[in-house]
Image: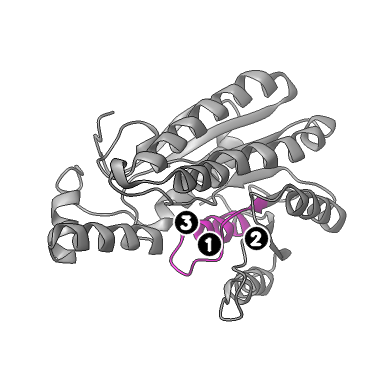
Amino acid sequence: MLMNQLNGKVALVTGASALQGIGRAIAMRLAADGAKVVVTDRLAPTTVDNAFARLEEIAQNIRNAGTDALALPLDVTDSDQISSAVDRCISDFGSLDILVNNAGSLAGSADFLTTTPNEWEMSYRVNVLGPMMLSQAVIPHMQKHGGGRIISIGSTGSLGAEPGFGAYTATKHALVGFTKTLAAEFGPDGILCNTVCPGYIATDMHEAANERLAAEAGESLEAIRKRRYASVALRSAGLPDDVANAVAYLAGPAGQYVTGINLPVAGGVPMGI
């Protein structure tokens, strides 16, 4: 880890509230590298939801370590909330240099014939439309300030396919194409745009998918894990920190001549790639 390589930079990370999540690991890593970090997530419309408490905890942990942080509610499908969050980030910290489009949805992760149009639409709104609207909101600021980094979290499903994840896979493929377009269009402005493509990472979302597959197959969780990880060269799931390390590379000075790529962090998963 190159300490303080992001001093003076400001990062906004979406989908950061999960206790065992990629967003949380990314936020902590960018802060450890010296960036001020705005952590965001969607707050469910229920009194039992504690996502904001988790966001505040992350922000406080970052502040306790000596770096500024801010926790904000943000539904990436809501353009008004996006504008508010970006404006607040810039007004509080003076800049927005790094956008990490991490928020994602597994809506539509089911047998293709039973996936509903509403599930396809929700997957598209979170996985594609949200990053698009956020990018539109931050790029003008980055253009005025000489550049920036936009890093979107895709999946090995962005590069290949696995049965039972039709809407998720389709939208993650779209995210890659969208990010390549940004890289080509805004490279002259010094805005580098890349996709990090995690494979099987031990997160809350990944375990939820394992549980669904186990229930559908009538198998144990351990059997599902063994079967899925058999396709991994390293024969195991990775950790959120493994993805955070890749994001830190693309966000930092070592990644200053890297744009338009899809970087698998997958332990060697073929997945039809």
Compared across the picture, whether 154 is left or right of 101 comes to left
**Which element is circle 2 on?**
strand
Estimate the x, y position of residue 12 in percent, counting from the top left: 67, 52
Q: Which range of residues does the magenta coloring cover?
A: 12-32
33 falls in the magenta region? no
Q: Which colour scheme appears in the figure?
A: one colour
Observer able to see residue 100: yes
Instruction: Return the mark for residue 39.
Output: 2
Compared across the picture, whether 167 is left or right of 113 comes to right
Estimate the x, y position of residue 85 in percent, counting from the top left: 76, 55
Instruction: Return the mark for residue 24.
Output: 1
Name the outermost residue toward the bottom: 48
Check if mark 3's residue and mark 1's residue have beta carbons within 8 Å. yes
Q: Which residue is drawn at 13% across and 51% down?
A: 227
Q: Residue at x 42, y 51 (%)?
A: 106
Mark 2 or mark 3, which has the lower sequence index?
3
Check if mark 2's residue and mark 1's residue have beta carbons within 8 Å. yes
How far apart are the two marked residues, 3 and 1, measured between alpha carbons?
5 Å
In the displayed structure, would residue 30 be above or below residue 121? below
Question: Mark 1 belongs to which amino acid?
Answer: Arg
Q: Mark 3 points at which residue?
A: 22
Q: Nearer the viewer, residue 129 or 69?
A: 129
Q: Quadrant of residue 61?
A: bottom right
Compared across the picture, whether 268 is left or right of 2 comes to left
